[in-house]
């Protein structure tokens, strides 16, 4: 058992480090904030943490995790092997003095 201890420690350390998200890059700073729609909420923090909840057809879905990367306007949240991609069809934009964004087909408004 002790001859495997260094390998196990390295594996745990690698998994822990890979679970850490990346801070939101400056060019995506408009994504940071609390976004809401009647049946959906999304919180994106500057440090790259995401909290998501949605009610669709009576099914409640929620997720929390670090942003792993941006792919164009979309962003990937979670850890390797267990991640989800949030499809952003309209990145943050201003309309009538309010910030909006369309994620997974839902128009969200930023809470100021």
Image (spheres, helix red, strand yellow):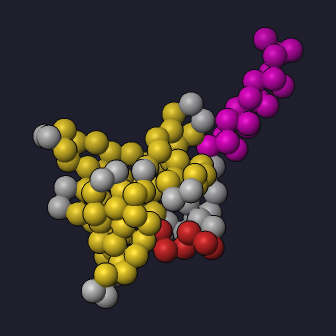
> In the rendered view, would you say 93 is above or below 89?
below
Q: Is residue 84 above or below residue 100?
A: above
Q: Estimate the x, y position of residue 25 in percent, counting from the top left.
A: 63, 67
The extreme top residue here reads 1
Q: How far across and how far down the image is residue 10, in percent? A: 79, 31
Give the residue at the far left of this rendering. Answer: 58
The residue depicted at 63 percent of the width and 73 percent of the height is 26
Q: Nearer the viewer, residue 72 or 84?
A: 72
Which residue is depicted at the point 67% across and 42% down? 18
Q: Is residue 100 visible?
A: yes
User: Magenta stretch mostly in which secondary structure?
Assistant: helix
**In-front residue for pair 83/103:** 103
Q: Is residue 67 in view?
A: no
**What is the quadrant of residue 24 in the picture?**
bottom right
User: Which percent across, then down, holds residue 11?
Assistant: 74, 29
Name the residue located 48 percent from the left edge and 70 percent from the top edge: 32
Left or right: residue 81 versus residue 13 is: left
In terms of image quadrants, where is residue 41? bottom left
Where does the image place residue 9, in percent across and percent down from the top left?
77, 30
3 part of magenta stretch: yes
Q: Decide whether residue 82 is among the magenta residues.
A: no
34 lies left or right of 21 = left
User: Which residue is at the far right?
Assistant: 3
Q: Looking at this view, is 93 or 77 the one in front?
A: 93
User: Which quarter of the rendering shows the C terminus?
Assistant: bottom left
Residue range of the region highlighted in magenta in the rendering = 1-19
For the N terminus, give its image quadrant. Answer: top right
Marks counted in the figure total 0
What residue is rendered at 47% in x and 44% in y? 85
Q: Is residue 88 left or right of residue 56?
A: right
């Amino acid at each position: 058992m002790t001859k495997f201890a260094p390998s196990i420690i390295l594996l745990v350390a690698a998994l822990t480090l890979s679970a850490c998200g990346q801070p939101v890059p400056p060019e995506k700073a408009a994504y940071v904030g609390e976004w809401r729609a009647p049946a959906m909420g999304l919180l994106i923090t500057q440090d790259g943490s995401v909290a998501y909840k949605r009610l669709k057809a009576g099914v409640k879905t929620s997720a929390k995790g670090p942003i792993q990367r941006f792919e164009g306007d979309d962003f990937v949240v979670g850890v390797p092997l267990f991640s989800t991609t949030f499809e952003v069809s309209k990145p943050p934009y201003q309309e009538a003095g309010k910030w909006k964004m369309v994620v997974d087909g839902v128009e969200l408004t930023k809470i100021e």
